[in-house]
Image (cartoon, helix red, strand yellow):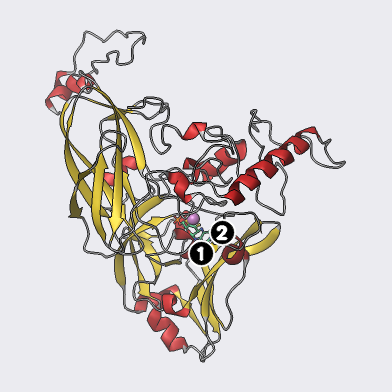
Amino acid sequence: MSMSLPASDSAPPRASARTSPNEPGPATPGRRQFLATSAAATAAALTAPRAAGQLTTGNPLQVKPANCTTVPDTPTPARPDPQNASRVFSAAETVLAFRNHGMQAEFLREPLTPLGGHYLLIHFDVPHLEAKGYSVAIDGRVRNPTRLSLDDLKQRPTIKQVVTLECAGTGRSTLHPRAVYVPWFKEAMGQYQWTGTPLRPILEQAGLLDDAVEVLFTGWDTGIDLGVEHAFERSLPIKEALRDEVMLAWEHNGVPLLPQHGFPLRLVVPAWYGMASVKWLRAITVLNEPFRGVEQSKVYRYQQVKGEPGEPVTFKRVHSLITPPGMPDLITRQRFLAPGRVTLQGVAWSGAGRITRVEVSTDDAATWREATLVPVSEDRFAWTQWRIDWDAGPGEHILACRATDEAGDVQPVNPENRWNRQGMGVNGVQRVHVTVQGGIGASQSRVPSAAHVVVPGAEPVTVPGTVNTLAAQQS
Ligand SMILES: Nc1nc2c(c(=O)[nH]1)N[C@H]1C(S)=C(S)[C@@H](COP(=O)(O)O)O[C@H]1N2
Ligand SMILES: [Mo]
C-alpha cells in the first residue's frame, strides 16, 4: 500500500506527482496545450514590470511558491487560470474558504445536518433583508404579474423536504491543476429539512404565456465576477421549474432561514447542484429566451479549454462520503483507531435518483466490498446511509467508498477523470487515511484524561494524580 498520502482525504496518493503536463493521464490535448501556454504566461508575468498605477501593496499574505502561478491581487475580467501548485493555497483561496465554510464531516452521522453545520456558498455579500415588508415579484411572460409577501406564501400549501445540497465546485481541490475559487475538497455539502411552498402552483396561477421558455430567479445580492457587475441570478427551463419538488423555502430544520442561507426566502431545487437554489430571492421572471447572464452562460460550465462554452452544470453527479472513523490528528486530520471490529458508515446521493450500490475499500481502492444501504429519510432527495463492518488490523489503511446510482453512473476512482477548467462536478471517490494502533481511545478511560503518546517521538505529558471519580461514573 502506498503510504505517501499526507492529507487526510480527497487527494489520491500519487496525484501530487501529476502536475507535469507531460505525464500520461486523462488530460486532453486541449488541456496539455493550456498547461504549456499558462506556464509561458506565468514566466512572462513574473518578469514583467508592474504597470504604472497598479497597486503594489496587494495582500501581504499572498503565497508565491515556485511552480505556482499566483492569484492576481487586483480584479480582472477573467478568472485566474487553474493553478499548478498541488498543495499550496493562495491567501485569496484561504479567505474564500473562511467565508464559505464546509460541513463538518462528523455530522454525516446525523440524519439532518445541525443548523449552521451545512456548507455555505456566498458569491458576493449577504444582503440585509427584513421579513417585514418583504415580497417576491413574479412577472415577465405571465398573464397575471403578482407580488407575494412572506405571509401570502405561508398561507399556501406547506411542504417539508429533506434535501442534500452540494456545491457544484465540490472536489475542486482534488484536481491538479485546480481552478481558483472556494477550494473545496469534500465538504461542500449538507442536508437540512426545508419548509416552504411548491413553486409550480404559483407559476400556474401567474399563467405562463405560450412563448415562455425559462424562469429566471434573481437574488438581492450583487457583485462583480469576470469584470461584470450583476445580481446573482440563475434560470431553469420551464419543465424543470415545474417539477413538484422545486420549492420556495423560508425555514431550515424548523427555524427561519439564517441570513447566510438566504433569509427571508430562497429557492430550493433538490436534484440540481447548489447554484440553482437562489438565495435572498428578489424576483421571478418568466423569459421567452434562454437566459445568458454571467452565472448561467459563463460560470457553471464544464469547460476543458479556455473560452469554449462547455456544457451547462445541472444535476448532481453520483457521490458518496465516509463518516470519519476514530479520532483525528489536529493538523492533518488523519484518523486514528483502535484495532478490532468497527462499523464504517457514510452517505451517498445523486441528482439522477436513487443510490443502488455503495462499495467500500479498506486497501486504497485495490479491492471492494458491497455495503448495506440504510435509508435515513422517506424523502427522495435525501442522502442514503451506507454501513459495513471492518476488522481493523494494526497498521496504515486507506479507506474509500464508491457509489452507483439508478442511472448506472459510478464515481470515478481517479478525480482527474473529471478534470475541467472551473473544477465543477468533481465526484472522484473519497480516500481517508486511517492509522489502526493499540491504545487509541484510552485517554477517555479516566478524568483528567489519561493523555498518552501516540506518535513516535512525541514528548510525554504528566497526568495529574488526582482523579475526578464523579466524572468517571458518567461515561
Ligand atoms: N442569491 C444567491 N443565491 C445563491 C448563491 C449566491 O451567492 N447568491 N450561491 C449559490 C451556490 S453556488 C450554492 S452552492 C448555494 C449554497 O447554498 P448555502 O450557502 O445555503 O449552502 O446557494 C446558491 N444560491
Ligand atoms: Mo455552488
Q: Tell me the amino acid under the disc marked 2.
A: Pro
Q: Tell me which corner region of the image, top left, top right, bottom left or bottom right, holds residue 12.
A: top left
Q: Secondary structure at mark 1?
A: loop
Reply above or below: 333 against 41.
Answer: above
Which quadrant is the C terminus positioned in? top left
Q: Tell me the amino acid under the disc marked 1.
A: Trp
Q: Write the residue at 46% across / 76% down.
A: 149
Q: In the rendering, which numbered label is found on residue 356?
A: none
Mark closest to the chain's N terminus, 2 or 1: 2
Counting from the top left corner in percent of width and height, residue 390 is at 17, 35
Which quadrant is the N terminus positioned in? top left
Q: Tell me which corner region of the image, top left, top right, bottom left or bottom right, holds residue 466.
A: top left
Counting from the top left corner in percent of width and height, residue 355 is at 26, 58
Sort mark 2 into few (<14), some (14-19) or many (20+) by Cα contacts within 10 Å: some
Q: Write the residue at 61% across / 71% down.
A: 292
Q: Secondary structure at mark 2?
A: loop
Closer to the camera in the image, 149 or 41: 41
Q: Ligand 1 within 8 A of label 1's CB?
A: yes
Closer to the camera in the image, 27 or 182: 27
Q: Seen in the image, is 262 located left or right of residue 196?
A: right
Q: Seen in the image, is 146 located left or right of residue 63?
A: left
Reply above or below: 169 against 197.
Answer: above
Counting from the top left corner in percent of width and height, residue 118 is at 39, 50
Do tag 2 and tag 1 residues touch (Cβ < 8 Å)? yes
Q: In the rendering, which numbered label is found on residue 280?
A: 1
Residue furthest to the right: 52
Sort mark 1 into few (<14), some (14-19) or many (20+) by Cα contacts within 10 Å: many
Residue furthest to the left: 473
Q: In the rendering, which numbered label is found on residue 127?
A: 2
Q: Seen in the image, is 143 located left or right of residue 469?
A: right
Q: Write the residue at 36% across / 25% down.
A: 329
Q: Seen in the image, is 8 located left or right of residue 345?
A: right
